[in-house]
Every structure is written in C-alpha cells, then in structure tokens.
Image (cartoon, rainbow, N blue to C red):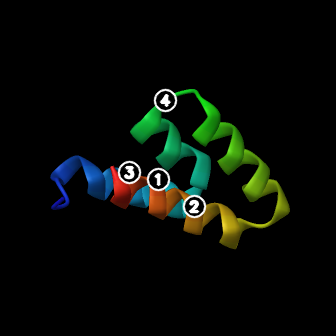
Amino acid sequence: MPLTCSDIFKIIGACILPPIGVFMERGCGKDLIINVLLTILGVVPGSIHALYIICKY
C-alpha cells in the first residue's frame, strides 16, 4: 500500500510521541494500549511499533 499525504503527518507524530501516530491511524484500541506500554519501556520500541502500524495499514 503506497503512503499518502496524511501518512506523512502520522509518521511525524510517531517520531515526536509514538502513541500520537498510532492514535491517528487506529484510534483508541488495543494497538494504542500496546504502543503506550512499549513507549513506557522505551521510545525506540514504541517508535518501531508505531511505524509498523502506520506502514502496515
């Protein structure tokens, strides 16, 4: 699936604070909770998960 213009804003949001990018892509749900927990463990795991969610869907 190609990236769209809105994906660029999601990726920027994911770089600043990873849960923002996941929230903009998937809304409130299990992916957001997982990302918040990963971000608490470290910014790198949270960022990787956020970029995966944004690029996957």
Query: What residue lies at 69% left-to-right and 46% top-to-bottom?
Result: 34
State how far apart marks 1 and 2 are (Cα): 13 Å
Q: Which residue is mark 1?
A: 13
- Residue farthest toward the bottom in the current orientation of the protein: 44
Q: Looking at numbered disc 4 in the image, what kind of residue is underneath it?
A: Gly
State how far apart marks 3 and 1 are (Cα): 5 Å
Disc sitting over residue 10 in the figure = 3
Q: Looking at numbered disc 3 in the image, what kind of residue is underneath it?
A: Lys
Q: Looking at numbered disc 1 in the image, what kind of residue is underneath it?
A: Gly
Q: Looking at numbered disc 2 in the image, what kind of residue is underneath it?
A: His
Characterize the local packing of mark 3: few (<14), some (14-19) or many (20 or more) Cα atoms within 10 angstroms: many
| Label located before the other in sequence (4 or 1) | 1
Residue 21 against residue 48 in the figure, above or below: above
Q: Secondary structure at mark 3?
A: helix
Mark 3 touches mark 1? (CB < 8 Å): yes
Query: What residue lies at 28% left-to-right and 53% top-to-bottom?
Result: 7
Q: Which residue is mark 4?
A: 27
Query: What residue lies at 28% left-to-right and 58% top-to-bottom?
Result: 8
State how far apart marks 4 and 1 are (Cα): 14 Å
Instruction: Please tell me whether mark 2 or mark 3 is closer to you in this view.
Output: 2
